[in-house]
Image: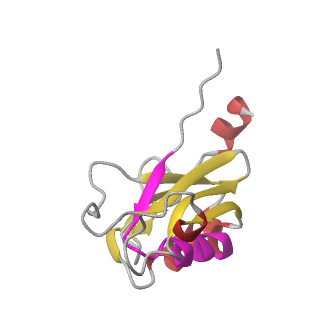
Amino acid sequence: MRLNLNPYLFFNGNCEEALQTYERVLGGKIENLVKHKDSPDKNVPAGWGDKVLHGRFTIGDNVLMVSDAPPQHAQNPQGFFVNINVPDSATGERIFNALAQGGSVKQAYGKTFWTEGFGMLVDRFGIPWMINVEHAARLEKTA
């Protein structure tokens, strides 16, 4: 049996904008975007027709699923970070700086005892991210 784990991220009405940013910054692809107005369920809150009911975003073999949370259910994510492993420090720094724009840095990007580059942030859409440079030797073992 093969299981796949992937985050399902909820946004506070700005899901489509977030995905467009992630597409640009991470080089991924928006594969599916279903709006509330396209749902057979016509009990859509006023003003929510163009909000995202469900979306699928891929980066290589990785999948993020996404949605706009209705206002009564919207809350800040807590207890996790979405980790991005990058091949080198320059790539990590570029991604970190782009995602940090308008957000809040939790740990500045820089060298640590385990890697050439690591940082933690919450982006302007409220999603927590960790950027981590994988060591080349470790990548060779898992490839």
Front in this rendered view, residue 15 or 124: 15
| Range shown magenta | 7-24
| Image x and y of residue 25, in percent | 63, 73
* Label tally: 0
Determine whether, in the image, residue 92 is placed left or right of residue 12. right
Residue pictured at 62% horizontal, 76% vertical: 20
Looking at this rendering, what residue extends furthest in the bottom direction? 102
- Please identify the quarter of the rendering in which residue 121 is found: bottom left
Determine whether, in the image, residue 49 is placed left or right of residue 56. left
- Placement of 4 over or under 115, stated as above or below: above
Q: Is residue 47 visible?
A: yes
Front in this rendered view, residue 62 or 98: 62
| Image x and y of residue 88, in percent | 65, 59
- Please identify the quarter of the rendering in which residue 26 is found: bottom right
Front in this rendered view, residue 40 or 50: 40
- Placement of 102 over or under 37, stated as above or below: below
Q: Is residue 77 magenta?
A: no
Q: Is residue 128 visible?
A: no
Residue pictured at 59% horizontal, 77% vertical: 21
- Quarter of the C terminus within the rendering: top right
Looking at this rendering, what residue extends furthest in the top direction? 1
| Image x and y of residue 127, in percent | 40, 64
Residue pictured at 63% horizontal, 36% vertical: 138
Q: Is residue 11 magenta?
A: yes
